[in-house]
Image (tube, helix red, strand yellow):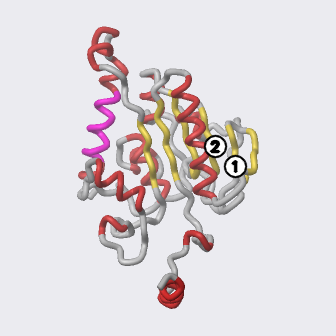
Amino acid sequence: MLKSSLVGIFAVISLFLGAASATPQEAALAGARPNIVLLLADDQGWGETSYNGHPTLQTPHIDALAGAGLTLSRFYAAAPNCSPTRAALLTGRSNDRTGVLDHGYRLRHEEVTLAETLAAAGYATGHFGKWHLNGLRGPGVPILAADPYGPGAAGFETWVSSSNYFGDDPMLSRNGVFVTLQGESSEAITAEAIGFMRGAAAAGRPCTTTWHSPSRTPSQPSTSCRRPTRSQRSTRSERHS
């Protein structure tokens, strides 16, 4: 399992390192550098998507990505819980080597992250959501600007983050300034990530966005998002008959 994960991550890192060391002529020949959006969902199993046949959960946007792109069905997480997985994903190394042995451990300063590598290649780098690599345990709190193990110390120039999981209307840290966002937590950080990407596009910079969704007790869906019950569907059919 670990080998499959690391091989894939190392392959991606090699591409990034090549881009960072390319000459201007090589960069021109390569054309425009792609934007990179990395989504990491906590506590979501491989089968919890409708494109993989889940009978209840509907994931139309993820399904669209799977249908239009490439799915790696043998790409495993490097660890069974949050902090170690994040450490391996950001560094391409075994989580034990990064110093993140379990949840709540901090990422070693000696590690080279994807964000640092991409920033050296001219990318705008942003992190949004749950960080959980600064050695704190328990419910999430906004990350201090001076935190030596926060996203800023790992190569992210823009970050709207929490130390761990958070709920709706979350209080997060925008580059060290505490802010309270409104709405469902995933939608709130989605809006922040989209704003970052639009800003990078307006500035003519390629961007990479690391987008970590929080893990928590699921919110109740709004009325507009709920699937109608059988009796409700029958009532609607009678009204239109």
Q: Where residue 174 sits in the image (x, y, percent)?
A: 69, 40
Which residues, given as a range, are shown in magenta? Answer: 6-16
Amino acid type at mark 1? Leu
User: In this figure, what is the number of numbered marks?
Assistant: 2
Does residue 63 appear left or right of residue 39 in this picture? left
Assess whether mark 1 and mark 2 are in contact (beta carbons under 8 angstroms). yes
Picture disc at residue 160:
2
Q: CA distance from mark 2 to mark 1?
A: 6 Å
The residue at 40%/47% (across/down) is: 88
The residue at 51%/27% (across/down) is: 201
Picture disc at residue 172:
1
Q: Quadrant of the N terminus?
A: bottom left
Q: Where residue 166 sits in the image (x, y, percent)?
A: 64, 60
Q: Where residue 154 sits in the image (x, y, percent)?
A: 53, 35
Seen in the picture, residue 141 relative to 217 is either above or below; the reply is above
Disc 1 element: strand
Does residue 185 appear left or right of residue 59 in this picture? right
Does residue 118 appear left or right of residue 6 in this picture? right
Residue lying furthest front in this view? 241
The residue at 53%/88% (across/down) is: 235
